[in-house]
Image (spheres, rainbow, N blue to C red):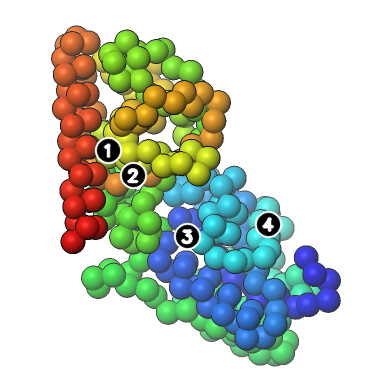
Amino acid sequence: MDQQRKTVVALGFFDGIHLGHQALLRRTVERAAELDMIPAVYTFDRSPREFVTGVPVPLLVAPEHRREAITALFPIREVIVAPFDHDLMTMPWERFVEMLAERYRAGFLVAGHDFRFGHRNEGTAALLQEKAAALGIGCDIIPAVTLDGVTVSSTHIRALLERGEAAEAARFLGRPFSITGRVRHGKGLGSRLGMPTANLVPPAGQLVPTHGVYVTEVAVEGQRFPAVTNVGVRPTVDANGEVNVESHLLDCGERLYGRQCRVEFLAYLRPEQKFPDLDTLRAQAARDAGTARAYFTGEKEREAR
């Protein structure tokens, strides 16, 4: 980080980097350009709610991919990922703002209307502005962003994905929900069925949408492939209960083993189900692939109009 210039710091957990987060980050970049400061993000390495309650919070973006997701959307120069621990949890809210000014040279802060911080969440957006002013720091509070009368939030998007509503979740995210991971060797069943698949296990802590079959796109090293993806435990052929994200890339014969890929969920087709035999599974997989092809053909026709 440039040790001479001050920063405009966006504050929040930023799970999902949804439309609300994007409004906040956009303002951060704009303020940084106006004030000749460095656009930065201050976030946490884990969900504060999970740390306090001990109840896992499945995340829309795995922690190790959040920095990449933020900088892919906005020219943020610095992403500060602070460990959310007991010291940070019990820090007085006034001290938290002072720390941003002293340690990270904050000259301007940007936060959402519902941002809470400090011991017992006593810090509010209004108190943040008040303390920032006392320190000679600017502060913008971003109001709630709504879509069709619904406030955009990570909680709402998680609920949509838990019901399989991938297309609706994409509207609130501003892009498709995705899972990123490295393709691993499976049992080779897809190849035996004539439909080879790229298999990945979701990162720890990553939210997985409701089990079922989806129309997807798979991004690999700058290339994009239309695909059909099964999320679940493969009850017809497996008994170990491990959740897999298994994608059949339409019209792609490349072997992806060991490569990093991103599976983007576009539309939900049907629930995962157990079939009586492999022939029935093969026939249904072929129908799913045909439905996915029709989806992409329809998309291309709409784009051409």
213 to the left or right of 50: left
Q: Position of residue 226 (x, y in %)?
A: 32, 39
Q: Position of residue 161 (x, y in %)?
A: 31, 47
Q: Mark 4 or mark 3: which comes first in sequence?
A: 3
Helix, strand or loop at label 4? It is strand
Residue under pointer 1? 214
Location of residue 16 (image quadrant): bottom left
Locate the N terminus by quadrant.
bottom right
* Residue type of the residue flagged with mark 3: Ile
Distance of mark 2 from mark 4, alpha carbons?
30 Å
Distance of mark 2 from mark 1, alpha carbons?
7 Å
Residue under pointer 4? 82
56, above or below 19, in the image? above
Marks 2 and 4: CB-CB under 8 Å?
A: no
> Which of the two marks, 4 or 3, is nearer to us in this view?
3
* Residue type of the residue flagged with mark 1: Tyr
Q: Position of residue 277 (x, y in %)?
A: 19, 9
Marks 2 and 3: CB-CB under 8 Å?
A: no
